[in-house]
């Protein structure tokens, strides 16, 4: 008994150290829990916002009007039509978009311009029955990757480079699926629209097309992917200058 | 003195054994240091967690309210003109938790018409106006002098493209052009 009584101080100290250990563990857990609290919800709110933006953009593209006469603006145009009506009319002629191709591109470019610095995007019209594309527009940036001055070789600085607007003609939907898989997290919106197609005898058919808008944080796509998309440049926007349409 | 082969402690012996004994509290003094340290750490982390929950909870609620303001004003992404905009603005006045200003910024509809961006300092002037009617909605009293700025708490800017209908009364022309509905919210 005397022995235990004499060791009382050490026992209390050990108890206190155990207590400290338990409290440290609990505090660490609490700290990490607090630091990570809400990150998932925050990400969901952000994703929901981009998804709603994509939906709003697609609806606005499909609702918008366009001047019937080239060179005129909406405000001073003598004749105006819905862009979608003009697209349908153009498609009905020969099952392809020709006259409305740049008009639609300009409209999409204008609607997506507020986000153009932070996002790349893809818009396409896909004829599900014919398994063919009526229209594919891709906006992507070419990041400039340079070594950090005075840094290690693995440290690089990524600055936004020129942005490119492409008309693409992928062979099938797989190339676009590969694209959306490659870019990681993306916001997507789609709608079904009915087009009109006239054959040589003037008989009308009504193919259904899937209009799709996908946007993602800029990601270098790489040559193999770009080759599979079969794209040609429509417009170039330098990082610090006005957009230009290169002479074809 | 020996008892069953052991030394029995006399008064002198007990005094010797209790050398360094500082009393009931003094004896446990070294153990009080980790105890107090553990309690301080726990209460510090507890307060930190409490404040974090509180701040993040408030930020989430503000963020959801900001989306609610934008969603009320944009509706189905189609505006039939200033009348429909004002109706939705009146509906949004029920939102009291946050302060907001909402308006329409013109988007490019053709080559050479670039989007001018969002500048908080001039945003009220930049909002689109058709004739004498400005597409502008707020729940901040005009004379309050309360404007959003970098120092505003939980400042957030939400933008959505919307289609706006126009009827030109002189030419009779009807058209729909894209606009950017921009909601700036703060506390």
Image: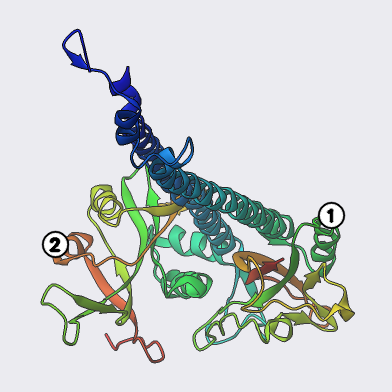
Nearest to the eye among marks 1 and 2: give it: 1
User: Foreground residue, A144 or B169?
Assistant: A144
Comparing B136 with A83, the one in front is B136
As displayed, is residue A74 above or below residue B73?
A: below
The structure residue drawn at horizontal position 46% and vertical position 58%, both measured from the top left corner, is A92
x 37%, y 57%: residue: A134
Q: Position of residue A104 (x, y in %)?
A: 47, 69
On the image, the x and y values in percent for residue B71 come to: 68, 55
**Spot occupied by residue A119 in the image (x, y as percentages of width and height):** 40, 67
Q: Which mark is residue B94?
A: 1
Is residue B105 visible to us here? yes
Q: Residue at x 61, y 56 (%)?
A: B59
Packing grade of label 1 (10 A; few <14, some 14-19, many >=20) is: few
Percent of width and height locating residue B74: 69, 59
Chain for disc number 2: A
Question: Secondary structure under badge 2?
Answer: helix
Residue that numbered label 2 is attached to: A224
Question: Disc 1 is attached to a residue of which chain?
Answer: B
């Amino acid at each position: 008994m005397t022995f235990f009584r004499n060791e009382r101080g050490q026992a209390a100290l050990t108890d206190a150290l155990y207590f400290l250990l338990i409290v440290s563990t609990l505090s660490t857990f609490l700290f990490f829990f607090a630091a990570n609290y809400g990150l998932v919800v925050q990400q969901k709110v952000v994703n929901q916002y981009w998804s709603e933006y994509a939906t709003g953009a697609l609806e606005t593209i499909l609702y918008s009007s366009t001047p019937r006469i080239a060179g005129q603006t909406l405000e001073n145009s003598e004749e105006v039509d819905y862009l979608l009506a003009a697209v349908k009319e153009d498609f009905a002629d020969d099952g392809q978009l020709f006259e409305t191709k740049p008009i639609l591109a300009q409209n999409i470019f204008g609607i997506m311009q507020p986000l153009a610095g932070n996002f790349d995007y893809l818009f396409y019209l896909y004829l599900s029955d014919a398994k063919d594309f009526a229209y594919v527009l891709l906006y992507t940036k070419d990041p400039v990757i340079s070594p950090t001055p005075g840094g290690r070789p693995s440290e690089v600085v990524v600055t936004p480079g020129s942005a490119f607007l492409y008309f693409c003609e992928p062979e099938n939907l797989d190339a676009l699926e590969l694209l959306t898989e490659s870019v990681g997290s993306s916001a997507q919106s789609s709608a079904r629209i009915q087009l009109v197609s006239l054959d040589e005898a003037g008989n009308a058919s009504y193919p259904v097309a899937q209009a799709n808008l996908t946007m993602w944080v800029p990601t270098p796509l790489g040559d193999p992917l770009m080759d599979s998309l079969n794209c040609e440049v429509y417009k170039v926007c330098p990082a610090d200058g006005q957009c230009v349409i290169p002479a074809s | 003195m020996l008892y069953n082969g052991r030394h029995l402690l006399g008064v002198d012996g007990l005094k010797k054994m209790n050398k360094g004994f500082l009393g009931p509290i003094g004896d446990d003094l070294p153990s009080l240091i980790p105890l107090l340290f553990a309690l301080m750490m726990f209460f510090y982390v507890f307060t930190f967690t409490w404040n974090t929950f509180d701040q993040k909870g408030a930020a989430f609620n503000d963020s959801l309210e900001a989306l609610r303001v934008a969603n009320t004003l944009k509706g189905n992404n189609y505006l039939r003109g200033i009348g429909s905009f004002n109706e939705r603005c009146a509906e949004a006045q029920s939102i009291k938790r946050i302060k907001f200003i909402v308006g329409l910024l013109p988007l490019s509809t053709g080559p050479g018409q670039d989007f001018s961006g969002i500048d908080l300092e001039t945003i009220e002037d930049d909002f689109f106006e058709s004739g004498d009617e400005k597409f502008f909605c707020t729940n901040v009293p005009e004379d309050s002098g309360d404007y959003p700025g970098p120092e505003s708490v939980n400042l957030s800017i939400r933008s959505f493209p919307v289609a706006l209908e126009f009827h030109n009364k002189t030419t009779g022309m009807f058209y729909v052009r894209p606009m950017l509905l921009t909601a700036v919210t703060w506390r």
